[in-house]
Amino acid sequence: MSLEESLARLPDRPGVYLYKDAKQQVIYVGKAASLKSRVRSYFQDSRPRDAKTDSLVRQIRDLEYIVTDNELEALMLEANLVRRHRPRYNIILRDDKHYPFLRLTSDEEFPRLLVARRVKDDGSTYYGPFYPATAMRETLRLTRQLFPLRTCSITIDGRLERPCIQYSIGRCNAPCTGWETREGYARTVADVQRFLEGKDEDLILDLTHEMETAAAEEKFERAAVLRDQIQSLKKVRERQKIISTDEVDQDVVGVVRQGADACVELFFVRKGRLVGQESFFFDKVAGWSDGEILSAFVRQFYAKDVRAAPEVLLSEDVPEAELLTAWLAERAGHRVQLLAPQRGPKREFVALAEENAAIALQNRLLGRGNRQQLIQEELARELGLPGLPNRIEGYDISHLQGGEQVGSMVVWENGEVKKDDYKRFRIKTVVGSDDFASLAEMLRRRFARTLEQGGPLPDLVLIDGGRGQLNAGLKALQDLGLDYLPVIALAKREEEVYRPDSLDPLVLDRTSPALHTLQKIRDEAHRFAITYHKTLRARSSRCWTPFPASAPRSAPACSRRSARHGKFARRRSPSWPAFPRSRQSSLNGSTSISIGRRARRPRQRKNRRPRNRTSSCSVFRPRAELSAARGSGCGHADPLADMTARETIPLFRWISSIGSTA
């Protein structure tokens, strides 16, 4: 079905639509209250123009749609499809990890506190998620330090003779031996629940009262343990920054942009305390508004096992806020409000998140720039370049036994690949397998065109290969008067760098970022070349050439194999000609002479009839007969052994005419 037919059959119902390109890859996923009106609006001349949508529409070749019962289901389905396909024109949350939870088991008589990555409906109590995961590990360590919960997975029946080392270090009261009752362990579990739920004040009051009672009864060791627990709880509260006097649960989200990059900062406020924060980075968001970025973030982040707080404070209004609020409330199991405050304390919280987002984005961009600066300086220092290599061009050749020879040029500029400047070449003047000549032709064509039409010259030319490829590239550039361009070659096996001014290859540290950059450019050139080569091979695979029933020894082994099994083989090289069926029939039954090496005995397979050795599958006589007929023993080499396959065609015709008298 064509795209026009699909547009004509769109239903007037809510659902999700998927745009595909010429390769049938999903490039955009969207939802609509009415598929008919929403999808058709992309192809109307009256729609608002922007570069992002124009680029998307130019690449659409097909579409699919899924009808849903309502728009809320469409929103949920859209989030799942975006996470599955990761389309090019959608805003993608790169951070796809699952945040950890702490799980207090309920199916055990003596519960344990375990780490969980997903929330399951198993009756257990889950606490979290924790942002980042280090907060979970710190909480788990502190919980086990404060409260003597068991960590073993054995069945507790109170019959063990002696406890494990956890009892000796004070981390467990040994219910496995019966030294701790079920009631005492239940009180410990209740304290753990209050601690994880943030009810620190009540817990501290109870522990203080218990400590005073133990001291009054002169149980000083027990009182010292309780004192240490109280001090640890107070330190935890001090580390949690108080940002609200109201004990409310809030998620504060702020977004900051710089060019095509954006950062979303998320604060997790529980009981008025900042318990965690996380930064999320987006790239290639030019053309998207801040509200659209926030909407995409909320849909993808809360689509995981993350429950939204009752209040979600945003730095900008998001489109379709009511629908997004209903979806969040359904996933969280409680009422959720999406607010974009303009003044007051809540606006100050959002401003604090924006300030942190700006700092995180600036550090990220500076880190990216500084890292690139260090890589360029290391390349210039190790390779002896006159300046920093801002533009590096990588070249590679790909072919199969000299057939479908192609070349590739990839460009690395300012720390990123620049695919708009990629070029591919189909080798025209080289016959057979000659990588050096093919590389020289590619370089001549590329730089001759640049000298004629103008264009940027690279700061460094990188060739995939060794010393031979380097010399071929240098000769081609010298012929064009570009011998001043720096040229190196990177060999694959030992990752050695060959330079014109040194006979010994340069071996960089395997952990060097400069070597990693050169490897990335070399591998990208190889990928680009072999992809084009495979495309040409697939295009020419429709043309098959039948080989004769008996191929001469000078033919490739694959051709002889195909001839023995009576199959058709694709022509591998232009030097091996095609034989019409009429010529095959004229060769059948004729006596012939050996050309080249002695023909090997065909391998016999089990449970198969042996081949007829007098049939046309073996038309050559042994080499010894030819030597005897010419007067064997002279010691001279066989003059027919060096004949090419094309030169043997007249010989085959002569054999056919005199076969009866040979």
Image (cartoon, grey):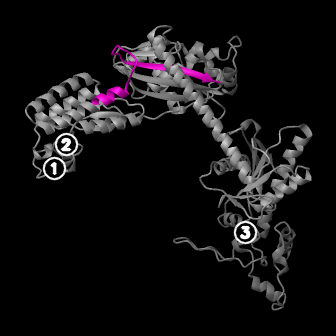
Q: Position of residue 516 (x, y in %)?
A: 63, 49
Q: Position of residue 256 (x, y in %)?
A: 57, 21
Q: Name the residue furthest top.
A: 343
Cα–Cα span, label 3 and label 2: 84 Å
Q: Residues within 10 Å of mark 1 (few under 14, many from 20)?
A: some
Cα–Cα span, label 1 and label 2: 9 Å
Q: Position of residue 207 (x, y in %)?
A: 19, 28
Residue at horizontal 55 percent and vertical 16 percent from the top = 291
Quadrant assignment for the N terminus = top right
The magenta stretch spans which residues?
A: 233-258
Q: Position of residue 239 (x, y in %)?
A: 37, 28
The label number, if any, that marks residue 550 in the structure image:
3
Q: Do tag 1 and tag 2 residues touch (Cβ < 8 Å)? A: yes
Q: Is residue 239 one of those drawn in magenta?
A: yes
Q: Is residue 642 one of those drawn in magenta?
A: no
Q: Amino acid at mark 3?
A: Ser
Please say if 364 is above or below 392.
above
The answer to which of 612 and 118 lies nearer the viewer is 118
Q: Earlier in the sequence, mark 1 or mark 2?
A: 1
The answer to which of 96 and 201 lies nearer the viewer is 201
Say which residue label 1 marks. Answer: 163
Residue at horizontal 84 percent and vertical 66 percent from the top = 646
